[in-house]
Image (spheres, rainbow, N blue to C red):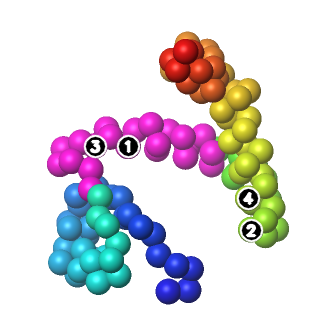
């Protein structure tokens, strides 16, 4: 494999991911399979919302000439997202503030 392999592949239980061809390939490469429970479509709602924010607030607004530029831009964005950007669902606090309050 050119870029290495993941330890775990997470997906839903759609037929394209549960087929013997697909799961067999993962097993052949000793990749663990993790699937969301059947009928648990909302399991991914938080991560889907995060990636929507990343795309609309950073990716679509910035041109990155190479992988390093993209990495650095995303690093800055996630720092902003976690430490500066308030979230309505967190009662207008940042994720870091919400985490620290819960950890205390």
Judge from the rendering whether residue 96 lies leftward or rightward of residue 69; answer left or right: left
Q: For the point 73% across and 49% down, which residue is it?
A: 75
SS assignment at label 1: helix
Q: Are marks 1 and 3 in contact (CB under 8 Å)?
A: yes
Which numbered disc, 3 or 4, marks the residue that appears first in the sequence? 3
Query: Which residue is labeled 3 in the image?
Result: 41
Residue hosting label 1: 44
Q: Secondary structure at mark 4?
A: helix
Residue pictured at 35% horizontal, 81% vertical: 29
Highlighted range, magenta: 35-55
Marks 1 and 2, Cα distance to the nearest angstrom? 27 Å
- Counting from the top left corner in percent of width and height, residue 9 is at 37, 64
| Furthest residue in direction front, as rendered | 104
Measuring 54% from the left and 40% from the top, which residue is drawn there? 50
Q: Main secondary structure of the magenta part?
A: helix
Task: Name which of mark 1 and mark 2 comes first in the sequence.
Answer: 1
Disc 3/disc 4 C-alpha distance (Å): 30 Å
| Res 18 quadrant in image | bottom left
Q: Disc 3 or disc 4, which is closer to the eye?
A: 4
Residue designated by label 4? 71
Mark 1 or mark 4: whose residue is earlier in sequence: 1
Classify 54 as above or below 1.
Answer: above
């Amino acid at each position: 494999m050119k870029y290495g392999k993941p330890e775990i592949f997470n997906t839903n239980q759609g037929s394209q991911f549960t087929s013997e061809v697909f799961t067999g390939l993962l097993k052949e490469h000793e990749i663990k399979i993790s699937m969301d429970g059947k009928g648990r479509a909302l399991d991914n709602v938080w991560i889907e919302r995060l990636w929507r924010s990343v795309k609309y607030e950073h990716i679509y607004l910035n041109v990155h000439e190479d992988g390093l530029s993209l990495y650095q831009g995303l690093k800055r964005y996630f720092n902003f997202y976690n430490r500066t950007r308030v979230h309505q669902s967190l009662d207008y606090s940042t994720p870091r503030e919400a985490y620290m309050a819960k950890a205390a």
